[in-house]
Amino acid sequence: MSLSIYHATKQKLLAHGVKNTEDGNLTLTDKRLFLLFVRLERARRSKCFEAVQAAVCAIETYAKSIGKRQVAIFAYMYMRFSDGTPKMTHLDETLEGGGVRKIKEYRRPVTDEEITIAAWARVKFDRYENSFFRALYSNRR
């Protein structure tokens, strides 16, 4: 029997360390924010880039409206460490013409759209990781 989408979303958020900070814990205690993460899980399951992007945007907008913009890092993490993320990236191979061949291994067969979602999430995560984590941990009591 599979987990309900609510339970699966909660487990994934817990795995990303939301309980480690007061602001991160909001993803579980703020009902509206949690439901936005459930929406993100639905979008992830649909493997639709536009739906994922819209769900993350909704989380970003709501987090900003409550003065906790840094909570959006959990949305980026949620997608960054998904099945579309390579299990292993091999060394880049330089080609004779000056190009580069990148070889990646995945845990399971993934679609081009899943790879796009994970790559987009990696870019967003890498862009905000340091500043958002600094904000999350500076609010610790």
Image: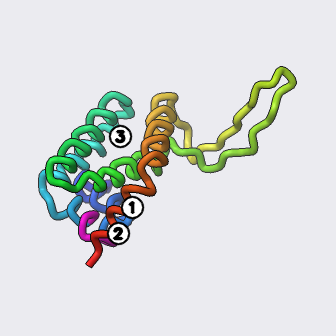
Contact? badges 2 and 1 (CB < 8 Å):
yes
Amino acid carrying mark 2 in the image: Tyr
- Disc 3 or 1, which lies upstream in sequence? 3
**Residue position marked by numbered label 2 in the rendering:** 137
Q: Residue furthest right?
A: 96
Find the distance from the CA under tag 2 to the CA under tag 1.
Answer: 6 Å
- The residue depicted at 37 percent of the width and 66 percent of the height is 17
- Mark 3 closeness class: few <14, some 14–19, many ≥20 residues within 10 Å: many
Q: Nearer the viewer, residue 114 or 4?
A: 114
Amino acid carrying mark 1 in the image: Phe
Q: Quadrant of residue 15?
A: bottom left
Locate residue 69, reporting x and y percent. 26, 51
Contact? badges 3 and 1 (CB < 8 Å):
no
- The residue depicted at 70 percent of the width and 35 percent of the height is 102
Find the distance from the CA under tag 3 to the CA under tag 1.
Answer: 23 Å
- The residue depicted at 47 percent of the width and 51 percent of the height is 81
* Mark 2 secondary-structure assignment: helix
* Mark 3 secondary-structure assignment: helix
Quarter of the C terminus within the rendering: bottom left
Q: Quadrant of residue 106?
A: top right
Locate residue 140, reporting x and y percent. 29, 74
Looking at the rendering, the stretch of residues picked out in magenta corresponds to: 19-24
**Residue position marked by numbered label 3 in the rendering:** 44
Q: Main secondary structure of the magenta part?
A: helix
**Residue position marked by numbered label 1 in the rendering:** 133
Q: Is residue 25 above or below residue 110?
A: below
